[in-house]
Amino acid sequence: MIFGEDLFDAYGVRLITMDRAGMGGSTPDPARTAASTAADYRAFVVSVTGDEHPTVSLVANSQGALFGLAAAAEGWAQNLVLVSPADEVAHPSVHALLPEAARTLPDLVQNAPDAARDLLRSFTPEAMRTMVRDGSDERDRAVYSGPAFDALYRTALAEGFTGSGVGYVADTMMAAARWDIDLSAITIPVTVLFGARDQVHSPVTVRFSPHGFPVPAGR
């Protein structure tokens, strides 16, 4: 996915994206973790820029928040922007705030991981597209349905679910489990953005942690 391309020249921005292991043109990594994914990002950026100490900003959306935070904890990025980030749904204080239906996946990941993988493997690009559109506000759905965005989204979903969805399954299993990230290690600026009409990601009851992250009350 790309965004803001009409502003790249004016602001001197170069947008770099990559396929996580098992998605698009990247081969799967059965041992992939959030930390190893963050290391992949750094290796990729170093390779593309030719700079061993690259000056980059990270942008992580939705479930990608896990990997953006893992990369930020490594300290090599300049700043991090979390756009409609998913939360750590397996964290007890977050889990307690979830509606019953939303607890199903984290509970399966913890108690019956094989069943969780089977459930996730049943997803298809079209099923994901339908779920996202049906769960969106009317104005957001209008954007998603626009011809240009829809074509881009369909392509991204097809790449994301390549190889029978092995990469998507790995990502979601990690995101639905406890996150092995030391948030106190993050010293770079972090900006968190939520859409005003986002009915999926927006926090309901939050406070700010000492590290500046919005977290559910009590966490």
Image (cartoon, rainbow, N blue to C red):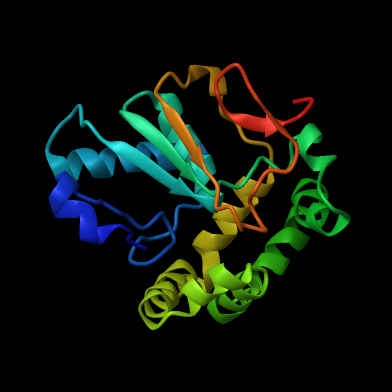
Q: Residue 46 is drawn in which quadrant?
A: top left
Q: How many marks?
A: 0
The x and y percentages for residue 66 are 54, 41
The x and y percentages for residue 148 are 35, 78
Identity of the residue drawn at 45% across and 52% down: 29
Q: Is residue 14 left or right of residue 70?
A: left
The x and y percentages for residue 108 are 79, 54
Q: Is residue 33 visible?
A: no
Which residue is more in the foreground, 71 or 191?
191
Identity of the residue drawn at 26% across and 44% down: 44
Which residue is more in the foreground, 147 or 85?
147
Q: Residue furthest right?
A: 100
Q: Residue 208 is drawn in which quadrant?
A: top right
Q: Is residue 53 left or right of residue 120?
A: left
- Residue 162 position (above or below residue 46): below
- Residue 158 position (above or below residue 94): below
Quarter of the figure that contains the N terminus: bottom left
Q: Is residue 59 left or right of residue 50?
A: right
Q: Is residue 191 visible?
A: yes
Identity of the residue drawn at 45% across and 26% down: 73
The x and y percentages for residue 212 are 55, 23
Identity of the residue drawn at 81% across and 52% down: 103
Which residue is more in the foreground, 62 or 217?
217
Quarter of the figure that contains the C terminus: top right
Which residue is more in the foreground, 128 or 9?
9
- Residue 66 position (above or below residue 115): above
Q: Residue 151 is drawn in which quadrant?
A: bottom left
